[in-house]
């Protein structure tokens, strides 16, 4: 079992503090949903864990099995087992999807122990079929000209090919129609198991109809303010966030504009 | 006031060089006139690069003797890699100034295709060469360097494809430079007669560290009505050369020329690629990639000039600059009066890898006709940190991520090179340069 522990995390962007002391612990074989209204710091959490160049961690720790993630470069974090399915994946012209994914897989392997081309192609074909993706997407340039839905599927394709220990899904459901959402959820459910933990960040309960979370957390004002089981998500769907605000005496849930 | 330049060779020396080659009178005369003009004519003035202090004139020796290759097995490994030794049916190799290997398929020869070194062509196909050598595309008296070239031509290739002949397999040329005293005054003349088609791919490779010579290269493509020419070139000349390379197309009615140029010299380089769309409905695609490094100074002018109606010209240039390299990219789409319904498009992108490098993209559209289409896009920028973040977030190292982005950036041109081995070589050269 692996554990990702986030303690007292403070994160700023352009000197504005967005996360203000966030705590979260995730084990493999668990799916955590992080919910909350817009502007409460959910995506900042995802970016800070992965090491986005614009986000500065000013206080707190992130550790995987005791290893200090914050001291690692972005690629080292990935090799330590982290994966972020991004809300807005970059487009890279001239680099085919297949070449990119193969590079990513081989980056985790020792020199001389690279995945064989045949094995890679078999696995890629199989996974693309599973995600109901056109085979020609393997030879298209990475995310270039992909529709919003194609980009999201492509993030899940990478997830399934790379097989990380912990995946963070940053609003993987936004902009997806119901069929695409089902496919994306199918991919994530396929990954669930002993060696895999997941943080799904979402605005909407809808995603959680297809991916049942083990734990649900609500973020407001740059912190986790409430945690519970799947029933918490259902109550949020039915009643919205106001009852939590009342319960906690919060007037404005967004990160204050300093 | 004209100042006479003291040239490296006298008129007398040019004349005896011509005699030693048994050149016909017309060519000896052309050289004689050219050497006179070279003394008087002004230097070219590449836009935004001052070349007054560059040495385009002096060299240690005009011509060096090299040993020809008896078989392809004798080639150095780095040259072998460029050639499909078994499969390449039509191949010319020049070693410094010496024709070193020639192979042309019987089929092409029987169809009347001419593929030989330029000085042999001057002797054996004088009527054809005389008609097109610096008459239609480049003129001898354009400036000092064109005249100097005409006077001193000491290598190059002549290709002639007769009417209605479609050459299926590419013609490959390799200019090997393995003598640091060598100067290259190569002239390439490709004439594609009406309704013909040909693919020509050349590579300049230096296997020496540093040259003491000149590279003054003029290459002309004449495409007659409805002819199609694909012209690929990879230039990898050593530092030390002062390189002037002029590639020019002259297209008649409905002719089409696709240029794919990998401009990878380590020398200071002035490069101009100009295509004249003379005939109605003619079309030119000019794709080039450039990598600059070290203290290199380069100027690349790419121009498509529209004279014919419904003519179309597309310029695509991608450059990567590192270290303290300085490069000017001039892109010119010029539509002359009367070239109605023409379309001139261009795109220039420069990627900067270092604070000290300089890259300027200057797109120009010069339009003397109302009823046309034209467009341009230009950008100079650095590798996008968010792209790197994305790639690295999958476990790819920063260096590898940069490599992927740069390759991707250059891919549109690299992928359009028509010979696989040359494409691979260019990829390798780029890899070596941007590392």
Image (cartoon, coloured by chain):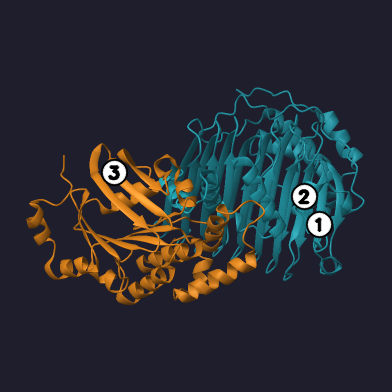
Chain colours: A orange, B cyan
Q: Which mark is residue B184?
A: none
Name the front one of labels 1 and 3.
Answer: 3
Tag 1 secondary structure: strand
- Residue B135 appearing in the image: no
Q: Which mark is residue B174?
A: 2
Report the side of A79 relative to B217 (left or right).
Answer: left
Density class for disc 2 (Cα within 10 Å; few <14, some 14-19, many ≥20) is many
Chain letter behind tag 3:
A
Density class for disc 1 (Cα within 10 Å; few <14, some 14-19, many ≥20) is many
Cα–Cα span, label 1 and label 2 = 8 Å
- Residue A191 appearing in the image: yes
Q: Residue beneath label 1, please? A: B91
Foreground residue among A81 and B148: A81
The residue at 82%/63% (across/down) is B89
Cα–Cα span, label 1 and label 3 = 66 Å
Q: Residue beneath label 3, please? A: A9
Label 1 in the same subunit as label 3 = no
């Amino acid at each position: 079992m692996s554990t990702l522990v986030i303690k007292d995390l403070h994160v700023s962007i352009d000197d504005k503090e967005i996360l203000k002391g966030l705590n979260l612990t995730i084990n493999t074989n668990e799916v955590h949903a992080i919910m909350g209204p817009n502007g409460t710091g959910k995506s900042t959490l995802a970016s800070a864990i992965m090491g986005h160049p614009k986000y500065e961690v000013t206080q707190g720790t992130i550790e995987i099995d005791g290893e200090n993630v914050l001291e690692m470069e972005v690629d080292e974090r990935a090799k330590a087992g982290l994966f972020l399915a991004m809300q807005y994946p970059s487009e890279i012209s001239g680099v085919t999807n297949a070449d990119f994914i193969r590079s990513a897989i081989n980056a985790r392997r020792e020199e001389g122990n690279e995945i064989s081309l045949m094995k890679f192609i078999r696995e890629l074909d199989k996974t693309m079929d599973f995600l109901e993706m056109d085979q020609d997407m393997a030879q298209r340039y990475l995310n270039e000209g992909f529709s919003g839905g194609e980009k999201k599927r492509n993030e899940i394709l990478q997830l399934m090919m790379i097989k990380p220990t912990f995946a963070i899904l940053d609003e993987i459901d936004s902009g997806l129609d119901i069929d695409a959402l089902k496919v994306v959820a199918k991919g994530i459910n396929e990954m669930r198991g002993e060696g895999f933990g997941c943080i799904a960040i979402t605005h909407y309960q809808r995603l959680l109809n297809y991916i049942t979370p083990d734990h649900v957390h609500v973020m407001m004002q740059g912190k986790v303010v409430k945690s519970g089981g799947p029933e918490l998500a259902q109550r949020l769907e039915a009643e919205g966030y106001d009852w939590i605000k009342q319960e906690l005496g919060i007037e404005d849930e967004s990160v204050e504009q300093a | 006031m004209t100042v006479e330049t003291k040239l490296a060779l006298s008129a007398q020396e040019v004349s005896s060089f011509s005699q030693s080659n048994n050149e016909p009178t017309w060519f000896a005369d052309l050289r004689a006139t050219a050497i006179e003009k070279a003394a008087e004519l002004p230097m070219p003035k590449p836009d935004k690069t001052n070349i007054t202090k560059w040495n385009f004139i002096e060299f240690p020796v005009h011509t060096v003797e090299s040993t020809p290759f008896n078989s392809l097995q004798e080639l150095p490994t780095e040259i072998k890699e460029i050639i499909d030794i078994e499969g390449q049916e039509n191949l010319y190799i020049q070693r410094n100034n010496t024709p070193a290997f020639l192979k042309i398929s019987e089929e092409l020869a029987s169809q009347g295709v001419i593929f030989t070194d330029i000085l042999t062509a001057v002797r054996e196909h004088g009527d054809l060469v005389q008609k097109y050598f610096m008459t239609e595309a480049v003129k001898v008296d354009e400036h000092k360097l064109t005249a100097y070239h005409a006077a001193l031509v000491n290598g190059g290739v002549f290709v002639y494809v007769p009417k209605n002949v479609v050459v299926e397999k590419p013609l490959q040329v390799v200019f090997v430079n393995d003598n640091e005293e060598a100067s290259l005054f190569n002239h390439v003349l490709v004439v594609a007669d009406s309704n013909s088609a040909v693919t020509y791919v050349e590579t300049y490779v230096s296997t020496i560290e540093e040259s003491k010579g000149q590279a003054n290269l003029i290459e002309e493509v004449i495409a007659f009505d409805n002819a199609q020419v694909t012209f690929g070139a990879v230039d990898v000349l050593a530092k030390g050369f002062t390189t002037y390379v002029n590639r020019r197309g002259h297209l008649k009615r409905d002719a089409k020329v696709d240029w794919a140029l990998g401009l990878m010299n380590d020398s200071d380089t002035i490069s101009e690629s100009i295509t004249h769309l003379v005939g109605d409905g003619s079309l030119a695609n000019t794709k080039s990639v450039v990598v600059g490094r070290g203290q290199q100074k380069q100027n690349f002018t790419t121009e498509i000039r529209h004279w014919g109606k419904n003519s179309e010209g597309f310029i695509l240039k991608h450059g990567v600059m590192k270290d303290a390299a300085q490069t000017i990219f001039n892109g010119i789409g010029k539509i002359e009066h009367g070239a109605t319904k023409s379309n001139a498009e261009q795109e220039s992108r420069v990627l900067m890898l270092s604070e000290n490098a300089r890259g300027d993209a200057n797109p120009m559209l010069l339009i003397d006709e109302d009823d046309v289409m034209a467009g341009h896009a230009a950008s100079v920028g650095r590798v996008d940190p968010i792209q790197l973040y994305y790639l690295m977030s999958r476990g790819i190292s920063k260096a590898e991520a940069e490599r992927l982005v740069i390759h991707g950036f250059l891919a549109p041109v690299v992928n359009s090179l028509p010979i696989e081995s040359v494409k691979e070589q260019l990829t390798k050269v780029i890899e070596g340069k941007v590392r």
